[in-house]
Each structure stands twice: as C-alpha cells, then as structure tokens.
Amino acid sequence: MFEKLKILLCIGAVMAPTLALGQATPIGDAAAGAQVYQRECASCHQIGEGAVHRIGPHLNRIFDRRAGSHDDFRYSEALVRQGRDGLVWDLVRLHAYIENPRALVSGTRMSYRGLNDADRRANLIAYMRAYSDQPQNIPEASPTAIAREVELPAETLALEGDVEYGEFLSAECTTCHQRSGDHSGIPGILGWPQEDFVVAMHAYKQKLRPHEVMQSVSQRLDDEEIAALAAYFYKLGRE
Amino acid sequence: MILNRRRFLGTATAASAALSAPMALGQAKPRVVVIGGGSGGGTVARYIAKDSNGAVDVTLIEPSRMYYTCYFSNLYLGGFWDFDALGHDYGNIARTGVNVVHDWAVGVDRDAQTVALASGESIAYDRLVVAPGIDFVEGSVPGWDVSQQSKMPHAYKSGTQAQLLKHQIENMREGGTFCMVAPPNPYRCPPGPGERVSMVAHVLSQTNPTAKILIVDPKENYSKQALFEEGWERHYPGMVTRIGPDFGGNNVEVRPDSMEVVIDGQVEAVDVCNVIPAQKAGKIAELAGLTDASGWAPVLPSDMRSRMDENVFVLGDASAQGAMPKSGFSANSQAKVVANVIRGELTGSRIFPARYSNTCWSLIATNDGVKVGANYEAGADQIESVSSFISQTGEDAELRQQTYEESIGWYNGIVADIFG
C-alpha cells in the first residue's frame, strides 16, 4: 500500500493536476454512489447546489482541487501542509484517501476509518465527480435536496446553548473524547458546527446512530443540555 | 503548612485582583485537600484548580511520584501494552495550579479540619476529599498476607506487582498451572479478574500451550461472565477451569512456601498463584473515621459527601455509594460531580445536579474487545443504575476490533483528562 502510494505521489508531482486516468472510461455507477455517499459521507460533508461546509468541507468541485484549499474551512495542519506540498484531489488520490484517510494524510482531522470495497469507492467517486466541472467540464447537476439525518423542530435547533453548563456537562464527554481534539480510537468532537452537533446527539438519542455508549450518554441529555454541549465544544474548538 | 502559606502569600495580591469569586479581600483562599492521586483524586484536584482559576487553594497528597494505572495493567500482562505507558506523573496536575505533596497522609483530625502527614506536617482544609483506593482485608485468604506478595502477587494495584506477576507467568514451567484466587464482592474492577485470565491465557497459549489456568472463585457469577467464557472456549479451548462456590471455591487456603492451594480440603500444587484478596477502603479512610462495618466509606448519593462529615467527600473505590462499579471511569465521573459541588460551596459558582456514568472495556484476545456500561442517578439512599448495556456474545470480529480500538481511545482520553 505504502509502496504504491509512494510511486503514485512521484507521478503526481510531475503530472498533477491533469493525471489522465480514467477519463475515457466510466469511473463507476454514480446512482449507486449516491447511496454510498448518503451512508458514508453525508453526515459530515454536503454536496450539490447550496452545499456549505459542515463538519467537513463541502465537496462540490472536489476534482483537481488542491487539498486543504478552501480558505473558509479549518483543516488539520497536516492536510494543509500536504496541499502546500502539492496534494491534489484526482481520481487516484481520492481512492487512496477514502480507502484509508490516514494512509494518505497522517494527522487528518477526518474521523473516518475508510472504505475498503473498491467498487463502492468507485461508485462514490463517480457520484462526486458529477458535482465537479473538472477535468471534463461536467455541468453541475440539478439541485439536490440535502436531507438531514434527523428532523428536529426549528425551536430545538434554535436553542442557544448555555456554555457554562456545557462546560460542566462536557466533563462526562472528556473521559473519552479528548479536549486536545486527538481522535485515535474515539472521534474528535471539537469545533463542530453547533447544528451538526445537535443533530448528531439527537440521532444517537433516537438510536438512529448505532453506538451503545453514545446512545446511553445521549439518552438522558435533554434539548437544552445538548445545545449547551454543542455551544461549549464549538467554543473550545475555536480557542 | 508552611509551603502552602508561602505560596499563598506570594500570589495573593495578583490572584485577588483577578478573582470573580465572592470573597472578601484579606480573607484566606478556601482550601481543599485531596488525599490520593488516582483517577478520583487526580481528577477532582485538577478540575477544582482548573475551573476556579486560582480562587481555591488545592493540595493533593500522594506518596508516589508516578501513578501506574490499574486499568490496562492486564493488557500489559498480555503483552498488548507497555509498562511505561501505564505510568503518569503529576507535572501537568501541578501546572494546573494544584500543590502536589508527595507524602503519606497518616491521620485526619476532623474537628480541627487538618490532615497529618508522615513528615510531621499538617495541612488545614475547608473541604477534604478522600480517594485512597483499596486496601486488602487481612485474613480473607487464609495463608496469605502482604508479606507473601512476592511469592503470590496480588497485582491488583498495578506497578511493580504487575511486573512481578508478568515475570512469573513468562517463566512458569512448561505445562504448569497458573492459579487465580478471585475476590468476593465488592471489589475493584468487576471484569478485571476475567480480563486477567484472558490475558494470561493469551500469553500461555503462545509460549506454554500445555499450561493450565485454574480460577478459584467464591462468587456464584461475575461481570461479563458469558462473554469471557465464550471467548475462552473460542481462543483458548480447554485451558481454563473455574471452581465456583458450589465446588468449594469459597473455601480456599494458600501455602506460599510450598506453592500449594487448598480448595475445600483438597491440596493442589500450582506454579504461579495470583491471590486477589477481599477488599476494603484504603486505610486512611478508616483512620479518618469515615468507614462503617463493611470496611467501605458510606456517602450520600447526591454528591459523594461522607455520611460521617459534611466537609468530607469520599471518591472512587473507597466509597460505598450504591450501584456504580469500583472503576477508574466511575471515580473520574464521581470526581467531576464533587469538583462542581465543592467549587460551588467555596466560591459561589453554579452547582448542577449530579450525573454519573461508567463504561468498562475488557480485552479477551487480540482485537477481541468487549464493554459494559451504564448511566447512574442519585436515588433516595444510594446511587442507582438507570440504563445499561453490554456487548453481546456472537458479535462479529469487526465490531470486537472496533470495541478494542475504542478502549485504547478511552484510555488515552481518561489519562489525558486526569494527567495530560
């Protein structure tokens, strides 16, 4: 894997950003990729018309974009450095990154353990390419409604979190989730957009997300407590 | 204490200017003394110091300069964790503003509100937190006392005892017998003995596959029993035998000099013997008059306050609080409740209702991790479990691996929370 990566990175240095792989042949099944996207990516990344940065950056026009190059998104230092060194999101590198993020970018903040199945990856990348106009000037697809994971009443989402209370409550979280943002084995939770944090916690509370500890922790958090945690961890991530 | 007073005088002017706490100028800072620098004591000292921004004088009394966690010491026995990675020093706790005093607390005068140290000094407190962990009940395993711990290690307080046990396991004769005398309830780390057997079996199955493991257990059943038994059958078939109370596991005597274990009158020769005796609160809790006939220190469920003294809190393994298991996770969870209450009482900061939780991960074999956990609330008389979960038998390998990876994440998380 690493040997392969090393070779590809050498080629990339010469040929990027026009690595001419797969231009003539279909990458994969974009319709099937839409389902993979929903399952694997959509809880953190938006794509399509009106997509904005959430936990991760939006993925419109990801093809041939230099890694870490949205000025208005906070990337890990490691990803930005790789972008500076010349990492560009072409077909090969997207495959490698999605297969195992940390194989490509040590220290990436993308808390995703990777997608082993090469066919599903190909379908996913085909789907994402439909939202890129490079390298083949593929027109933007029609507007895509971006479904939320959990539908919450507007007033729940509008609750303003009590940061001080959130700090007290956060002590229960930091037994496992580190305040430093380190995410080995257990995901990082700093600096998430508050709405995403709130939606995620309600998804655990409603047992739509499968993790027993998180289901258990979220079970006894009411709407205000979830908002308080969202506010506190957002603030902590900006400090 | 002279050191404290000097430090206080040196910083009083600067600190009082920055204080938002309701405290009259010239009045000494409120003083919190914490006895014991483990998961409970370390957390409470750090959280009070961190959250009060210097408004509370916090002293942590802990004899060891290096704390070796008991959790994950089984993984060390199994070769999955480095000994050095179990150790944590107090540098970062001190940098949070805690006065760390490396000494033994030898007595508490609850009327004068002072703690006596082995060095002869005494330290005054407004609130005292007692978090000494466990001690062993003398005579609970006939034939064994701490003077025998080099022949038959307990290895239940991590550190050098864990190193000794590992050495003995690795040097056991081919085809020999490892015996564990398991403790009666209640004891530290309910799944700990089962996890230890798993780790010993993991080592022996590789280096000494004809060796046997004998568990002598006074309890009818134990934490995660179905998960462990399923795992032993799968990974180490035929290696582990358990003698429960129905076959005399509650009637055991050990003979360290001849390396024999007498089970219900029958003499068994063993090669390594891990004796985990019955347990009680750490001695200082008893010396302070905080324990009852059970040997543990009863506390109020709402905030871990001692039932013997409203200015004293008892945390973690030493406390008798109800349904929470004696674990590092529990102690850390309880400590955060106590830190919030003490800071509120001393500085007027907000006090929130207690929330307690616990999860215990255990490793059965390579990448085969399981967990058990629950939420807890203050009931009328004791802490009660309100919801719980446990790994299931028959789970797939991918989930078990993820659970194991999660346990490593948890270890790194909790030690960062306390010592990082």
Image (cartoon, rainbow, N blue to C red):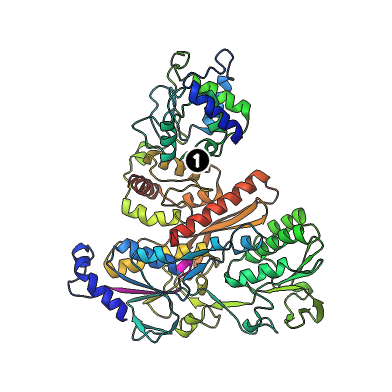
Q: Position of residue A28 (x, y in %)?
A: 59, 20
Q: Position of residue B386 (x, y in %)?
A: 52, 58
Q: Amino acid at mark 1?
A: Ser
Residue at screen point 50% across, 55% down:
B412
Q: Nearer the viewer, residue B383 or B139?
A: B139
Q: Position of residue B357 (x, y in %)?
A: 49, 59
* Residue B364 in which image quadrant: bottom right
Residue at screen point 41% across, 32% down:
A84
The reply to whether residue B340 is visible in this rendering is no
The reply to whether residue B256 is visible in this rendering is yes
Residue B32 falls within the magenta-colored stretch: yes
| Residue to which mark 1 is pinned | A106
Which region is colored magenta? Answer: B30-40
* Residue A64 in which image quadrant: top left
Q: Position of residue A155 (x, y in %)?
A: 34, 39
Residue B368 falls within the magenta-colored stretch: no
Residue at screen point 69% across, 78% down:
B151
